Amino acid sequence: MAILNLHFYSQCLRREVPVTALIPMDSPVHPKQENASKPLKTLYLLHGYSGTHTDWINFSRIRELSDRYRIAVIMPSGENHFYVDDEERGELYGEYIGSELVSFTRKLFPLSDAREETFIGGLSMGGFGAIRNGFKYASVFSRIIALSSAIIPYKIANMEPGFKDGIADYGYYRSVFGDLGCLLGSDKDPEALVKLLKDSGSELPALYMACGTEDFLLDVNRRFHEFLIQEQVGHVYRESPGEHTWAFWNDKIEEGLKWALEELPAHP
């Protein structure tokens, strides 16, 4: 297992950015690993609000899981920008995740360039980022793993100056998502992206969602789940006891990986 912390210059963000990567290419070859020389399946894994690109390494079992399932894991920094493009500042976090980072890491590491072997996932803010960019870049990612997703367009659309919740205020949300009166229906709205893919006849990525029943984001996860049912978009949705904690995410990231690798039945 190679663990790498690297920096490279991002054209999308116009600065040097950090990335942590797990590349399971030096593990002993077991009898069942006849295809050990094949390009690696890859999971682009996103951290949550106030986190960093090292969170998954520091707080989860992702190194063990990467090695066990022989899947590369690429962990970028999204800062607190919800992995969406900031057109006003010219900081294109979504394009960085969905295009530039994928292209760069495929040149650097022995990663598969096949859509069916390229996944995106994340927790909380990163769960939103995985859903948004998974659907936005549906030609790149075939599967999405979204844990305790902060699907906040439901909460902040049409927000007015002076609003403040337990996370941030109007000024912050306006700086990240742009004109909040135009948020719904934009490419920062997961519902709009799903409808756009359906209307164009494009193939939608498969989606695995999980949220704890004691999680403060349970309501928006249920709402998006209900939307997908109404739109007849197949997906896997899991609710189980748990809060917005690493204990829950550690359990569900393995289940999500098994599902993505088709080692777990894909029933609702």
Image (spheres, rainbow, N blue to C red):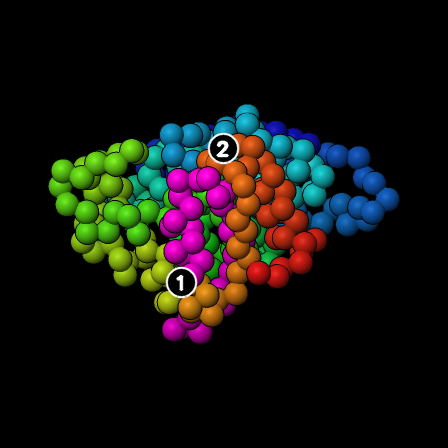
- Per the rendered image, the range of residues in magenta is 198-226
Where residue 90 appears, as percent x and y from the top left, is 26, 43
Is residue 34 in view from this perspective? yes
The percent coordinates of residue 24 (x first, y second) are: 68, 37
Residue drawn 56% across the image and 32% down it: 247
**Residue at the image point whose x is 62% and y is 32% from the top:** 61
Residue labelled with disc 1: 227
Could you say which is closer to the camera, residue 10 or residue 65?
65
Q: Is residue 217 toward the left or the right of residue 147 in the image? A: left
- What is the crowding at mark 2: few (fewer than 14 residues within 10 Å), some, or many (at least 20)? few
x then y, percent, for residue 94: 37, 47
Packing grade of label 1 (10 A; few <14, some 14-19, many >=20) is some
Give the label on residue 205, or none: none
Above or below, 15 against 154 in this view is above
**Which residue shows up at 58% across the image and 36% down it?**
250
Front residue (pair 87, 259): 259
Report the residue at 48% width, 44% height from top. Answer: 213
Mark found first going from the N terminus, 1 or 2 = 1
**On the picture, is 204 further left or further right than 111?**
left
Q: Quadrant of residue 73?
A: top right
Q: Does dot 2 land on a helix, a strand or a loop?
A: loop
Q: Which residue is mark 2?
A: 245
Counting every numbered tag in the picture gives 2
Residue 18 pos. (x, y %):
45, 30
Question: Which residue occupies the extreme right position in the image?
Answer: 31
Location of residue 48 by image quarter: top left
Q: Vertically, is 41 above or below 244?
A: below
- The kind of residue on which mark 1 rests is Phe
Q: Is residue 214 magenta?
A: yes
Q: Is residue 199 above or below residue 120?
A: below
